[in-house]
Amino acid sequence: GQQLNQSPQSMFIQEGEDVSMNCTSSSIFNTWLWYKQDPGEGPVLLIALYKAGELTSNGRLTAQFGITRKDSFLNISASIPSDVGIYFCAGQLHGNTPLVFGKGTRLSVIA
Amino acid sequence: GAGVSQSPSNKVTEKGKDVELRCDPISGHTALYWYRQSLGQGLEFLIYFQGNSAPDKSGLPSDRFSAERTGGSVSTLTIQRTQQEDSAVYLCASRRDLAVNTEAFFGQGTRLTVV
């Protein structure tokens, strides 16, 4: 099935560093979402973006909906150990179409 | 319940056997989704239900996979004649409705291992 291209696949960073990850698609989406998944848990929504060009923050997280509607990025500032996990981007064309997910970015934070 | 509940949390089955995975969505949520997550992969859409409409089955990988949603609430995903490549975490999610800004809430998943 259709998937988004998410990069990087994995990251090892020092506590306190900033992190950036991104997602691209060959087709447009009208909604972009970023999820975090902890081991043994389901994904949890971090940020939702509904408008092309939109820049949204949630605490230390900032995400942007690309102007072409084919890409999005997520930044995490001043990383802490509890940021460890797998981050997924997801795109949705319409409310009645399923979410399409990237393969995830596995983040490890070294204290 | 307070969240999406899935059972069992883990299932080990022999190749060729049938399995049933259960999802209890958040009460009142009309939309229910099933996804499959293979090791190191993203979430692969399988099927979704919305109210009384016919389900969108476009993601089911083969006719060994089927799902039902009884009474607009509980859903069961059935895999017949399981194969080793069916081993994965099966995630269920529900949404209040299909408005574009309604959040999808995920359960913890069922980890299926076919030996």
Image (cartoon, grey):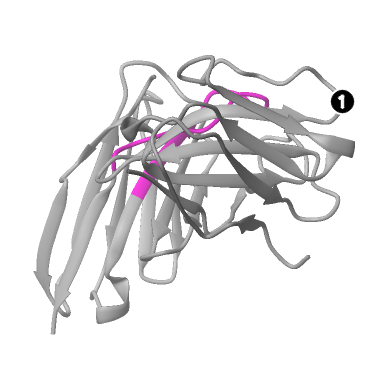
Residue B34 vs residue B18, the one in the foreground: B18
The image quadrant where one finds the N terminus of chain B is bottom right
Image height of B26 relative to B55, above or below: below
Crowding around mark 1 (Cα neighbors within 10 Å: few <14, some 14 to 19, many 20+) is: few
The spot of residue A2 in percent (x, y) is: 38, 20
Q: Nearer the viewer, residue B115 or A48?
A: B115
Q: Is residue B46 left or right of residue B16?
A: right
- Res. B29 visible in picture: yes
Asked if one can make out residue A52 in the rendered structure from this viewpoint, the answer is: no
Choose top left, top right, bottom left or bottom right for residue B92. top right
Instruction: State which quadrant residue B61 falls in.
Output: top left
Question: What residue appears at the point 73 percent right and 35 percent down from the top-left corner?
Answer: B99
Disc 1 target residue: B52
Specify the segment rendered in magenta.
A88-103
- Amino acid type, callout 1: Asn
With A26 as the anchor, is A99 left or right in this view?
A: right
Mark count? 1
Depth order, front residue of B39/B10:
B10
Callout 1: chain: B
Q: Residue at x 82, y 44 (%)?
A: B73
**Helix, strand or loop at disc 1?**
loop
* Coordinates of residue B3 in the picture (x, y in percent): 69, 63
Q: Quadrant of residue A1?
A: top left
Residue B76, position as x, y percentages in the image: 69, 39
- Answer left or right for B10 relative to A88: right
Q: Where is residue B40 shown, x and y percent of the image? A: 24, 45
- Image position of B99 (left or right of A54): right
In the image, is residue A15 above or below residue B8?
below
